[in-house]
Amino acid sequence: MTLEDLTEIIEEKRNKNEDKIVFTYYEMRVKQNLSPEELEKVLELVTNYLINNGYNIYREKEEYEYQGKAKKVESNEVLVAIKDKNIK
């Protein structure tokens, strides 16, 4: 997976829902065929990219608030990013 591929995936997700971006285990490990080590490196890049674009990042079992409701990163999700409304 190249950096361009990763940017394209992120932008596709942002176009679907700019407020909440979710990366699932299935799409990253199975569809993208990433090893556990590759997945960690990709998630680090995704995290940095999204933080720089005004998102708060949540991983494995972390709790977050979305649309006024308390949520938790599900077991099939490897990363959830929520747009910080306080950052323009």
Image (cartoon, grey):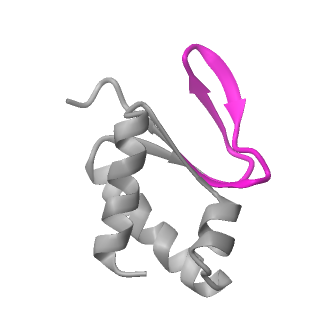
Magenta segment range?
A: 59-80
Can residue 73 be seen? yes
- Residue 55 falls in which quadrant of the image? top left
- Residue 56 falls in which quadrant of the image? top left
Q: Quadrant of the C terminus?
A: top left
- The structure residue drawn at horizontal position 58% and vertical position 13%, both measured from the top left corner, is 68
- The structure residue drawn at horizontal position 34% and vertical position 24%, both measured from the top left corner, is 85
Asked if residue 82 lies in the magenta stretch, the reply is no
Q: Is residue 38 above or below residue 50?
A: below
Residue found farthest to the left = 88
Give coordinates of residue 13: x percent, y percent.
Answer: 42, 46
Residue found farthest to the right = 75
- The structure residue drawn at horizontal position 59% and vertical position 25%, both measured from the top left corner, is 65
Question: 34 or 31: which is nearer to us?
Answer: 31
Give coordinates of residue 80: x percent, y percent.
Answer: 56, 46
- Residue 48 falls in which quadrant of the image? bottom left
Give coordinates of residue 32: x percent, y percent.
Answer: 56, 74
- The structure residue drawn at horizontal position 69% and vertical position 62%, both measured from the top left corner, is 25
Horizontally, residue 20 falls left or right of residue 69, namely: left
Question: 68 or 39: which is nearer to us?
Answer: 39
Q: Quadrant of the N terminus?
A: bottom left
Q: Is residue 7 above or below residue 4?
A: above
Asked if residue 72 lies in the magenta stretch, the reply is yes
Give coordinates of residue 21: x percent, y percent.
Answer: 48, 43
Can residue 50 be seen? no
